[in-house]
Amino acid sequence: MLDFRSQGFKRYFFNTAWIAAENVIRMAVILIVAVAVARYLEPERYGLLSYAVSFAAIFSVFASLGLDTIVIRNLVQDPAGRDRLIGTAFCLKIIGAGLVLIMVFGALQLTSNDRFTKILVLIIAAGSVFQSFGVIDCYFKSQVLARFITLSRLCSLLITSAVKFLLIILKAPLIWFACVTLLETILIALFYVIVYHLQGLKISPWRFDRQTAFKLLKDSWPLILSSLAIMVYMRIDQIMIKSMLNNEAVGNYAVAVRLSEAWYFIPTAISSSLLPALQKAKQISQEVYLHRFQVFFNLMTWMAIAIALPTTLFSGYIINILLGPQYSTAGGVLAINIWAGIFVFLGVASSNFLLVENLTKTDFMRTFIGCIVNVGLNFWWIPKFGINGAAWATLLSYAVAIFSLIFDSRTKHCFIMMVKSFIPTKGVWLQNDIN
């Protein structure tokens, strides 16, 4: 039984509460600002900005090098090696950021983009250098001190949001909005350093250790591949739409995707909260364990459907009210893309299953399969059906990725539970044993 009065419970509860509060506030602010910026820039310029962000984002995984979770784990296991671990990870991330800039510059030379578009991409990609200070985030997470990082991110978000509104009032050109994207990463890095010093800690003792670097990279390389597959999965459609159609099409598609993804913090928050109960159930009995996962899948499926149904019915009104008639074609994309949320919600839930069962390689493989399907369908459907084709490609590839678990005997039961979640029985909902 959990002792709700214990200091340990209170510590983790309030840490989780800070993270949840940040997610809710962040998504609300981002959505409001995104709508305002999209209305001001209009589809063509907003599409160009979204393309630049997507292009830079695909390469950004090489800046993080998949190190964060590894560093957090090692900091928990070896708190005395803090300066060595953080210093080594920081140096590796700086090297990764340099690699990102070289790769982005080289990739841009292979495209038909004009000089202005290339400048936008490079400005946004420059933020990868300052993302190296995310190692401070790793330290605070390892100490269960999320409030410091939460406040840093929120302060940065509120400042840059105010700047964006000021740019709208001043009718600033597009390039300034790209600069604000870079500014946000700079501010986050600055606030990270400030709170680190406020805790009585200093950056000067950080040091690079070659042996530690090899160990970190040995553990993180599978996560680099997984992160790359996920980023390509999420961003490649906007890049392909620009190359096959135009900036205006990217703008309409991007705003619909932004509205669809506004809900994606929900499954992550619920998943992290329920993971301990799911792990505990496996120690109790297989029956309790599978039942809890069935309840979890049911919850994810029907929450997503509850979001998707009204959004589809009123997608045209939503787009018109929030963004105006200039984004009218985004309504069709929103009506389709919002249903991908079902498979996103189930994907997060099934990731818990794969984590408990220690099948993380399977998690990567299904993401890789979905990525390949997504790219292939985009090549086929965007020329035929435009941005609606890209939305259908996203929806189908997400479904393929989730249900590919049927082909692995170790995950077949997980597949069956996900299918059953669409037709939950009364008993499953009424029984309450998740505690």
Image (cartoon, rainbow, N blue to C red):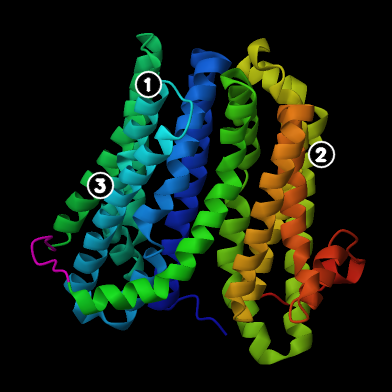
Q: Please name the residue that numbered disc 2 is placed on.
A: 309
Is residue 206 highlighted in magenta? Answer: yes
User: Where in the figure is residue 346, as x and y percent of width and height?
Assistant: 72, 59
Circle nearer the viewer, 2 or 3: 3
Q: Which residue is mark 1?
A: 115
Nearer to me, 418 or 89? 89
How packed is label 2: few (under 14 Cα within 10 Å), some, or many (20 or more)? Answer: some
Identify the amino acid type marked 1.
Arg
Q: Position of residue 241 (x, y in %)?
A: 63, 30
Magenta segment's dominant SS is: loop
What distance separates the C-alpha of mark 2 from that of mark 3? 40 Å
Q: Give the residue drawn at x 47%, y 58%.
A: 17
Of the two numbered discs 3 and 1 on the same chain, state the one appearing first in sequence: 1
- Residue 432 appearing in the image: no
> Residue, x 75% and y 84% (percent of image)?
288
Crowding at label 3, few (<14), some or many (≥20) Cα neighbours within 10 Å? many
Which residue in the structure is indicated by mark 3? Answer: 189
Which type of secondary structure does the marked residue at label 3 adopt? helix
Quote the CA–CA distance across marks 3 and 1. 29 Å
In this view, 286 is above or below 399 = below
For marks 2 and 1 on the same chain, the one whose residue lies earlier in the sequence: 1
Which badge, 2 or 3, is on the more N-terminal residue? 3
Tell which of 12 and 390 is nearer to you: 390
Kind of residue indicated by mark 3? Ala
Tag 3 near tag 1, CB within 8 Å? no
* Residue 321 falls within the magenta-colored stretch: no
User: Tag count in the figure?
Assistant: 3
SS for tag 1?
A: helix
Identify the magenta region.
201-208
